[in-house]
Image (spheres, rainbow, N blue to C red):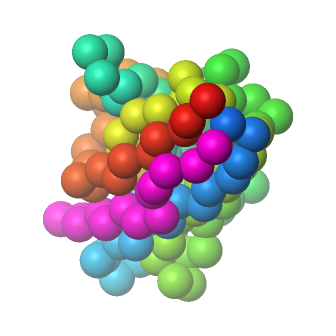
Amino acid sequence: QVQLVESGGGLVQAGGSLRLSCAASRRTLSDLVMGWFRQAPGKEREFVVSISRSGISTYYADSVKGRFTISRDNAKNTVYLQMNSLKPEDTAVYYCAASSGSLYNSRNNQWDYWGQGTQVTVSS
């Protein structure tokens, strides 16, 4: 079992930046693909980005390419999401997730563990 805890959300103006963190309770995350999803009000939860077990490979949704960067520190059991050039449409609850499957799994039901979410609000 893996418990994931997100932090770093908040309110930011359009064009600003935030850095989210996801800390895991497990002894090691190095055997899991990690990712971030988000859910805006009235919408389904959607895939944002994932990172391979080693951290070498990443997979981004088109909507965040060039603005968001995922990284991981397996020694600290932590995953990060650096979000730059934020837009109002990025406003959502952001969820950290872990999977024993593929880096390219973008459907919610393909991921095994979820955090409780952290709110990101971008004002115009």
Identify the image quadrant of the C terminus: top right
Instruction: Give residue 5's position: percent from left, percent from top.
Output: 31, 66
Q: Residue 97, can we see it?
A: no
Q: Is residue 24 left or right of residue 86?
A: left
Identify the image quadrant of the N terminus: bottom left
Q: Residue 9, can we see it?
A: yes
Q: Is residue 94 left or right of residue 69?
A: left
Q: Is residue 39 left or right of residue 15?
A: left
Instruction: Give residue 82's position: percent from left, percent from top.
Output: 67, 55
Instruction: Give residue 108's position: percent from left, percent from top.
Output: 31, 28
Instruction: Give residue 25's position: percent from left, percent from top.
Output: 29, 77
> With respect to residue 27, does 121 lie above or below?
above
Dominant secondary structure of the residues highlighted in magenta in the image: strand
Judging depth in this view, the residue of 62 and 90 nearest the camera is 90
Judging depth in this view, the residue of 107 and 32 nearest the camera is 107
Q: Is residue 89 left or right of residue 2?
A: right
| Number of on-image labels | 0
**For the magenta stretch, what is the residue range?**
1-13
> Which residue is located at x 37 percent, y 62 percent?
6
Judging depth in this view, the residue of 45 and 76 nearest the camera is 45
